[in-house]
């Protein structure tokens, strides 16, 4: 029998992040691997979703999103960034930001094109580019602040560069790209006529005076930016799978075609509920950042106290922690040791790098989008690592 596995699928593996959740469950470990909250979503959202179901909003919605949701999102974006979008021509509601990213890439990238990806990267990005038949070109951000080597980035751009994937605030590092960095990226994109795929799912989770600046708000960048976002992280509903993509009318028309044939549309009653979320007052977002800042500070202290060397994030809800003080040089083995023996699940750092980049093997990623009781339970178990060093 011939090999029926496609060349594309053979180039990447199943999600390690989601695999570590399964390992956590099997070992009854505290799951600080996958980035989903273990606390309830806002009551207003749950009530709105239930009302929509009982109001019989259970059939297909408009493929690219209900009008009420698109109108509500338009108002939120205008409030947050002083930009008025056309809800009829510039917004596509998707099944999560995961579908939003692949739909956007498939709608704009051709086989043989090159797409630049910053590493450490969210693991879907490389696979998405490969599924488009394109070639990912990686550039490693420089520790400890994960800054861009500008000469390296400039050298990656060429006539085949079709796009660059930007994620700020960043998963897994928590880096928030500065205006100066964004302006440098924007200049290169304009010079080489390149699209930006801007993943902004953590836009409202920032700390220490850091500010999320959407690259599409910079001069001459709106027409060449596709912004991908979701309600998952901001409203603690990762299971709802309601994402949205904003872009120019021309790009949106192409994205909507691909989205239509990928998934048809997102869940109708949940779209109705999300329209309610977009009407939350600004205080909600201030409280959200404060909520996560408290958890970040708690977990950073715990990790430092037991012997990790943490890179403190300025955004999102993850911590990259150096494992070398414990005598380990294999992040995957260490992640399984933590999960199976210590009882705390994490993600190996190499998940966020190419296979041949050694940087990732020094790290594991912890998430802190959890109840304090969960973090305290993890802290108690992690205490076993204090003064621990692996035998040679």
Image: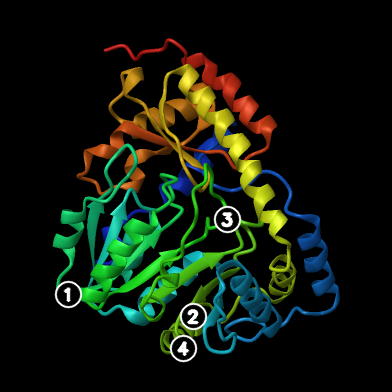
Q: Position of residue 51 (x, y in %)?
A: 84, 70
Q: Which residue is mark 1?
A: 160
Badge 1 marks a residue whose secondary structure is: loop
Tell me if residue 205 can be seen.
yes
- Please tell me which of labels 4 and 1 falls first in the chain: 1
Q: Is residue 355 left or right of residue 286?
A: left
What distance separates the C-alpha of mark 1 from that of mark 2? 25 Å
Q: Position of residue 186 (x, y in %)?
A: 31, 68
Image quadrant in which the N terminus is located: bottom left
Q: Which residue is mark 3?
A: 204
Tell me if residue 29 can be seen.
no
Is residue 46 depicted above or below 255 in this figure? above
The mark closer to the camera, 4 or 1, is 4
- Please tell me which of labels 2 and 4 falls first in the chain: 4
Image quadrant in which the C terminus is located: top left
Q: Which residue is mark 2?
A: 259
Q: Position of residue 225 (x, y in %)?
A: 39, 74
Quarter of the image holding residue 135?
bottom left
- Please tell me which of labels 1 and 2 falls first in the chain: 1
What distance separates the C-alpha of mark 4 from that of mark 1? 24 Å
What distance separates the C-alpha of mark 4 from that of mark 3? 26 Å
- Please tell me which of labels 4 and 3 falls first in the chain: 3
């Amino acid at each position: 029998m011939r090999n029926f596995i496609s060349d594309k699928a053979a180039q990447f593996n199943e999600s390690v992040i989601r695999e570590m959740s399964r390992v956590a469950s099997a070992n009854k470990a505290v799951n600080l691997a996958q980035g989903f909250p273990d606390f309830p979503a806002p009551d207003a959202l749950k009530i709105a979703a239930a009302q929509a179901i009982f109001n019989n909003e259970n059939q297909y919605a408009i493929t690219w999103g209900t009008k009420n949701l698109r109108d509500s999102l338009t108002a939120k974006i205008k409030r947050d960034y002083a930009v008025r979008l056309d809800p009829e021509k510039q917004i596509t509601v998707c099944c999560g930001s995961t579908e939003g990213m692949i739909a956007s890439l498939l709608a704009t990238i051709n086989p043989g094109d090159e797409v630049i990806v910053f590493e450490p990267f969210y693991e879907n990005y490389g696979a998405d580019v490969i599924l488009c038949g394109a070639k990912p070109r990686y550039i490693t951000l420089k520790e400890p602040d994960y800054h861009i080597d500008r000469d390296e980035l400039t050298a990656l751009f060429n006539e085949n560069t079709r796009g660059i994937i930007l994620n700020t605030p960043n998963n897994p590092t928590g880096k928030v790209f500065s205006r100066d960095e964004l302006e440098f990226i924007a200049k290169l994109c304009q010079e080489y006529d390149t699209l930006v795929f801007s993943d902004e799912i953590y836009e409202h989770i920032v700390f220490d005076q850091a500010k999320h600046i959407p690259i599409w708000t910079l001069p001459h960048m709106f027409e060449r930016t596709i912004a991908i976002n979701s309600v998952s992280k901001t409203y603690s509903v990762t299971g709802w799978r309601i994402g949205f993509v904003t872009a120019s009318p021309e790009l949106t028309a192409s994205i909507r075609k691909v989205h239509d044939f990928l998934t048809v549309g997102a869940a109708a009653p949940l779209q109705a509920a999300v329209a309610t979320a977009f009407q939350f007052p600004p205080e909600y977002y201030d409280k959200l950042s404060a909520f996560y800042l408290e958890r970040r500070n708690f977990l950073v202290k715990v990790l430092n106290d037991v012997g990790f060397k943490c890179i403190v994030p300025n955004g999102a809800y993850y911590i990259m922690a150096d494992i070398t003080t414990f005598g380990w040089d294999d992040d995957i083995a260490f992640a399984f040791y933590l999960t199976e023996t210590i009882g705390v699940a994490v993600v190996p750092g190499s998940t966020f790098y190419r296979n041949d980049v050694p940087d990732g093997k020094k790290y594991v990623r912890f998430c802190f989008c959890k109840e304090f009781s969960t973090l305290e339970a993890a802290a108690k178990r992690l205490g076993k690592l204090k003064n621990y060093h692996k035998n040679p």
